Image: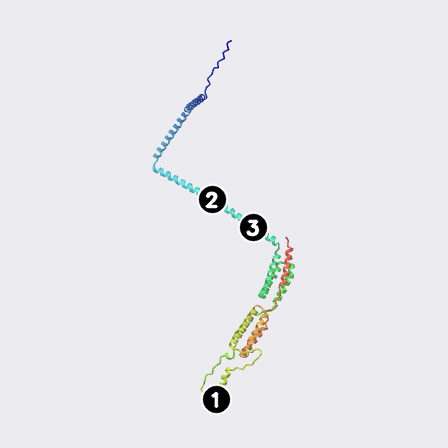
Amino acid sequence: MTEPAEPEHVETSQPSPARRGGQWVGRMLFATLLMLACLGAAGYWFGWPWAEQTWQRFEAMESKLGSIEQKETATPPAEIAKIASASADREIRNALATLESEWQRALAESSARQNAERAESARQISHRMKRVEDQVDRLLAVDRRAWLGQEAIFLTRLAGQRLLVARDVDAALSLLGQADGLLRDTGEPRFESARLAIARDRAALTAVPSVDQVGLYARLSAIIDQVDQLQLEFGKHKTKDTPGPVPERSWWDQASAGWRAALAELSNHLIIRRRSDEIAQLMTPEWAALARQNARMLLEQAQIAMLSANQELFDQSLGRATEFVMLFVEQDPERVTSLVEGIESLRGEDIAPALPNLTDTRSLLESQVERLGAEAPR
């Protein structure tokens, strides 16, 4: 038996990948060229008429510009200058009018703004003043009677200070009179007791004796001048007799005259004094000057005490001044007697009369004004 023959395999040829890629690129290139050709044909078909129209417009514009240039060259130069001048004037006037209108508008705006600010400031000031007045009325909450009462209290306090510091009776009377007038103007019946107290104080001040401070000061000054003139016996100036014609005397008369002259010379160097309790030592010129200075200082201290109404210091100063003046009683008795009499007459003066106390009147008035303020409507 023969074996069957095997079928033969026929090999078919397949395209390679490189070949397929080349075919695709060629097709794309052909399609691109075909598209460009179509676009060129369409652009030529539609763009050429538009380009011709644009070119015609350019030619028309060039012809118009040429005709305008010909007209301008044909215009005379004088007319051109006139037209240019008129145009410049018109432009200047327009610019000035514009500037003026802008300036007027800015001025009107500034004036309106200032008026508005001024009105606002006046309104704010008026509002603030009203608020201040309302606060004052609310804080004080007293009527006219209380105001007058407070002023009367101030005048009464001031009168008391004038009496205490300066002992000025006239000023105190004037101040109390003004306080009484203010209380009278209130018309308040509750102030009647205070007015009675003020009337009593005024009557007491009227009865106070006046002190002649000017006269006392002048009298003390005169005594001080006299103290400076106190002198010792041997310090006084002696008058010298003018020598006359000497008559002829006997030897006995000459011896008697020489003896008397020797005794007189001896009496000038030898002074006999009485030893007393007040003066226990010899008055020398240095001690006399010191005594005069102390007496002067004590009298000046009495002047200051008189001006300040210090009665105790005034009497003490005059008493001690009398002691120093009395040291010169044996040397200058007549002047010492006059000075002592003047000093003793001053020691009887009342330089500080009693003054009324205004504290009770002021306290009464303050309590009445306080009650009036408590009853004021809130």
Q: Which residue is mark 1?
A: 255
- Inter-mark Cα distance, 3 to 1: 117 Å
Mark sitting earlier along the chain (3/1): 3
Locate residue 329: give its quadrant: bottom right
Residue type at numbered disc 1: Ala
- For disc 2, the neighbor class at 10 Å (few under 14, some 14 to 19, many from 20) is few
Q: Nearer the viewer, residue 296 or 25?
A: 25
Q: Is residue 341 above or below residue 179?
A: below
Q: Looking at the picture, how far across and down is residue 239, in whole percent?
A: 48, 81
**Marks 2 and 1, how far apart in space?**
133 Å
Badge nearest the viewer, 2 or 3? 3
Residue nearest the observer in this picture, 125 or 25: 25
Side (left or right) of 166 relative to 33:
right
Residue 262 horizontal/vertical position (percent): 49, 85
Counting from the top left corner in percent of width and height, residue 37 is at 42, 23
Near mark 1 (Cα within 10 A), the count class, few <14, some 14-19 or many ≥20, is few
Q: Nearer the viewer, residue 2 or 270?
A: 2
Disc 3 element: helix
The relative height of residue 77 versus residue 241 in the rendered view (above or below) is: above
Quadrant of res 21: top left
Asked if the residue under mark 1 is in contact with the one under mark 3, i.e. CB atoms within 8 Å, the reply is: no
Please indicate whether residue 162 sits to the left or right of residue 70 in the image: right
- Foreground of the two, 302 or 81: 302
Residue found farthest to the front: 1
The residue that appears at 61% across and 53% down in the rendered structure is: 139
Where is residue 151 shown, x and y percent of the image? 60, 59
The residue pinned by badge 2 equals: 106
Residue 342 seen from this side:
no
The amino acid marked with disc number 3 is Arg
Q: Sequence order check: which comes first, mark 2 or mark 1?
A: 2
* Residue for badge 3: 128
Q: Secondary structure at mark 1?
A: helix
